[in-house]
Amino acid sequence: RKEVEQDPGPFNVPEGATVAFNCTYSNSASQSFFWYRQDCRKEPKLLMSVYSSGNEDGRFTAQLNRASQYISLLIRDSKLSDSATYLCVVIHSNDYKLSFGAGTTVTVRA
Amino acid sequence: DADVTQTPRNRITKTGKRIMLECSQTKGHDRMYWYRQDPGLGLRLIYYSFDVKDINKGEISDGYSVSRQAQAKFSLSLESAIPNQTALYFCATSDSSGLGTGPYEQYFGPGTRLTVT
């Protein structure tokens, strides 16, 4: 079983729609969590950290569920520019290395 | 100018050749990393370095070596390239002095697309 698993998608949504997807992790010692965005095989860029209480950044909302070992990302009022692959990243408390999911692809259509 | 640069950006080489990928950064970060990305597998850590005198293996270090020539430079070598090393390679940096989750926030270079024939 992979340490970090994501539904690869693609999630095809119209502009203005809400889209949400999860990422599950297997190591209960995981400490920190992030969402990165990657455009068309370019470099990943940090989108947002995920805090225990959940957090928002504009149209993006991230949630953490430690009991079920998953994090989620919700995008409201989708824009064409939100089309990308979203990478889930988990950090373990024992070695502080990052584990990346394979990514969830979102395509927003006009 | 980009904060993290990688050279070359694209490279085609033959099986058995030695190749070096270079990474430079102007962010002043102490930590540097090399990853490879393959379709459907996500990024996998090859090597990482927390300072100039520190080198650590990642999950897939076999067939690779690294050199941290200075705080700003971290190079990856394939001693004898093989076709299954064809991938997109990323260098990344992070700052151990960052607050909160700062030390874990990584900044990536633009990537090197390597093809081994």
Image: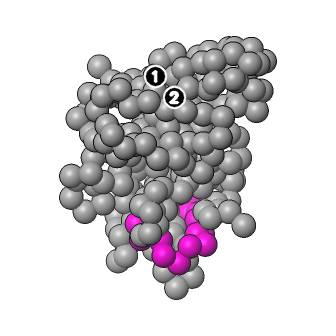
Q: Which residue appears farthest toward the front when viewing the image?
A: B53
Q: Is residue B105 left or right of residue A68?
A: left
- Percent x, y of residue B91: 46, 34
Q: Quick check: A45 left or right of B84?
A: left
Which secondary structure lies at badge 2? strand
Vertical relation: A1 (above or below) B38: below
Q: Quadrant of residue B82?
A: top right
Q: Is residue A28 above or below residue B11?
A: below
Left/right of residue B4 with respect to residue A27 in the rendered view: left
**Label located before the other in sequence (2 or 1):** 1
The C terminus of chain B - image quarter = top right
Q: Are marks 2 and 1 in contact (CB under 8 Å)?
A: yes
**Mark 1 — residue?**
B22
Residue B89 point in image, percent of width and height: 56, 32
Residue position marked by numbered label 2 in the rendering: B76
Q: Chain of mark 1?
A: B
Residue A35 location in percent, x, y?
A: 46, 55
Q: Would you call the spot at circle 2 few (<14 residues within 10 Å), some (14-19), or many (20 or more)?
A: many
**Rounded to the nearest whole Å, what is the CA distance between mark 2 and mark 1?**
6 Å
